[in-house]
Amino acid sequence: MIEVANLTKRYAGHTAVTDVSFTVGRGEIVGLLGPNGAGKSTIIRILSCFMPATSGTARVAGFDVFPQADEVRRRLGYLPENNPLHKEMRVCEYLKFRARLKGLSRGRSRERADVVMRQCALADVSHRIIGQLSKGYQQRVGLADALVHEPELVILDEPTLGLDPNQIRAVRQLIKDLGRTHTVLLSSHILPE
Ligand code: ADP
């Protein structure tokens, strides 16, 4: 599902990732572990088509992330580290909006929003304004967003960062459940994760 070969990323005057190679098979849950600044987010941003590598290759489901970015994006759900959400929107309205942006029809967006709200235990807050929810719920909205277009691969950047122990347990369980049907790549700087 993921093939990374000899990936290097240089920012102006600074090398963030040097000659990284790894593969992730279909149905695996794999963690990128390293201290802050190790280059985890950089690898994830390259894999999710947000920026090109300086050298090396990265493929998702056989598609090259740079020249075939549209094919990759269709197959990939991405939860960035800072979980950007439209906080003034209501949960169900936001998920339908995101599904439409990702190319789903109006009817399918409605259906998928309902499915991911159930999957991420958001049904009780579907009409609440996102900005008024706890951080744990907001993280689940970010996960639901990553899943709404039925991607084969889900990439989560520090998905438990800033959550309390109960919220961390809930998100971990959700990731385990996801692993039954998806390939999951997540990053963390916390060894027990
Ligand atoms: P991690 O996710 O493991 O904390 P990052 O990939 O965010 O690591 O960062 C790796 C290194 O690259 C760090 O030294 C960071 O300061 C640097 N870096 C990250 N993004 C940029 C950028 N846009 N411009 C310049 N340097 C960056």
Image (tube, rainbow, N blue to C red):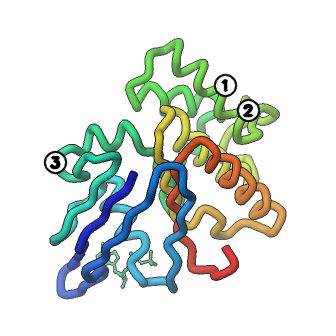
Is there CB contact under 8 Å for labels 3 and 1? no
Q: Return the residue found at the far top.
A: 107
Q: Which amino acid type corresponds to the residue marked 1 in the rendered image?
A: Asp
**Residue at image location 72% in from the left, 66% down from the top:** 163
Rounded to the nearest angstrom, the CA distance separating label 3 from label 2 is 35 Å
Pointers 1 and 2 in contact (C-beta within 8 Å): yes
Element at badge 3? loop
Q: Is residue 40 visible?
A: yes
Q: Amino acid at mark 2?
A: Arg
The residue that label 3 is drawn on is 67
Query: Quadrant location of residue 58?
Result: bottom left
Question: Tags 3 and 2 in contact by the CB under 8 Å rule?
Answer: no
- Describe the element under mark 2 as helix, strand or loop: helix
Q: Is residue 84 left or right of residue 47?
A: right
Residue beneath disc 2: 118
Total marks in image: 3
Q: Position of residue 142 (x, y in %)?
A: 58, 48
User: Percent position (x, y) of residue 193?
Assistant: 67, 73
Q: Give the CA separation, mark 1 to mark 2.
A: 6 Å
Left or right of residue 68, residue 48 in this image: right
Residue type, numbered disc 3: Pro
Residue in front for this viewpoint, 26 or 95: 26
Residue 39 found in image quarter: bottom left
Taking the spot 32% from the left edge, 44% from the top edge, the residue there is 72
Give the secondary structure at mark 1.
helix
The residue singled out by tag 1 in the image is 114
